[in-house]
Image (cartoon, grey):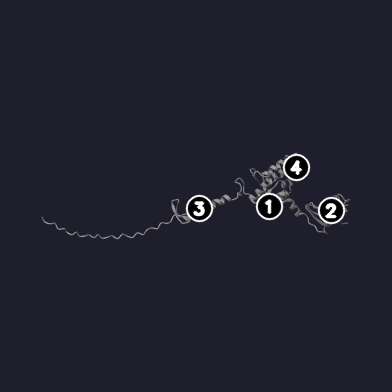
Amino acid sequence: MAENKKTPTKKVTSKKVKQPEVKPVAKKPVASNQGHEANRLLGGILLPQRVVVQIAEEVAQRVTSRLRRPVVDKPANQKLLENPLFLDTSAIIDARVFELIRIGVFTGTFVVVEGVLDELKHIADSKDTAKKERGRKGLTLLEKLRKDKSIKFDTYDDSDIKKPVDERIIEAAKITKGKIITCDFNLSKKAQISNVVAIDMYEMANVLKTTALPGEEFFIKVVQKGKGDRQGVGYLPDGTMVVVEEGEDLLEQTVKVLISRVIQTDVGRIFFGKIVV
């Protein structure tokens, strides 16, 4: 038997194909409590964490500002009032304001809140004859004002506000950036504290009263006796009191008076004078 020879096996060397080098992609660390950045999906869009935080902060600020905004907007049922002047009950009953409106001293939209109308109706229904007359006169003058086409007049519906009428007037004036016309000293002071302009008819009358210096002369009708010895009392057309020395015996007579001194009191000025012969 022939001996089999082993044929040496030739090693086949396979060529190594060089694979392209793939660099490992560094993973971004996920955001943690330490403030590291991470991406977030917002509405299907991948946004950096810092952008998401900025958006959230802006939204929060807007919501907070809306919640903190004071409710000073005019109610939806109120009209836009041009230069509103709010008349209170005392000014309407006093009635001088209507003459000032007529001659053009006050201009703007004259406004009466519902609370004032209610007060006037209550006074007009009073058992007291004097109060009843003044209340009815006030309502009549308001109606005349409303019908005057040359004057702007409106009412302010505040019937849903459960506060004293004075506070309702001040609040309405504040909301509409208006002013108040009144003869009520306390209302005037409350309005000033609330940074609302209040025109006091009594203060206005005192400002408009006649000013006189010692040495000036006036014709005065003596209408009553004075408190002092042999004094008589008369009045200037604006209501200023004139005390006439030696005028006690001249009642109902008009005399020429020389002003000797002027006294300022809480209710206005008082003139003292002597009769010019």
Q: Position of residue 56 (x, y in %)?
A: 50, 53
Sequence order check, earlier mark of 1 and 2: 1
Sequence order check, earlier mark of 2 and 3: 3
Kindly identify the amino acid type of the residue bearing the numbered disc 2: Val
Can residue 106 be seen in the rendering of this structure?
no
- From the image, tell me which residue sits under label 4: 131
Secondary element under disc 3, as helix, strand or loop, is helix
Q: Nearer the viewer, mark 2 or mark 3?
A: 3
Kindly identify the amino acid type of the residue bearing the numbered disc 1: Ile
Q: Nearer the viewer, mark 1 or mark 4?
A: 1
Q: The C terminus is located in which quarter?
A: bottom right
Sequence order check, earlier mark of 1 and 3: 3
Kindly identify the amino acid type of the residue bearing the numbered disc 3: Ala
Q: Nearer the viewer, mark 4 or mark 3?
A: 3
Q: Which mark is residue 193?
A: 1
Q: CA distance from mark 1 to mark 2?
A: 38 Å
Point 65% across, 48% down: residue: 171
- From the image, tell me which residue sits under label 3: 56
Q: CA distance from mark 1 to mark 3?
A: 41 Å
Asked whether disc 4 touches disc 3, contact meaning CB atoms under 8 Å apart, the reply is no
Q: Position of residue 83 (x, y in %)?
A: 65, 51
Q: Nearer the viewer, mark 1 or mark 2?
A: 1
Asked whether disc 1 touches disc 3, contact meaning CB atoms under 8 Å apart, the reply is no
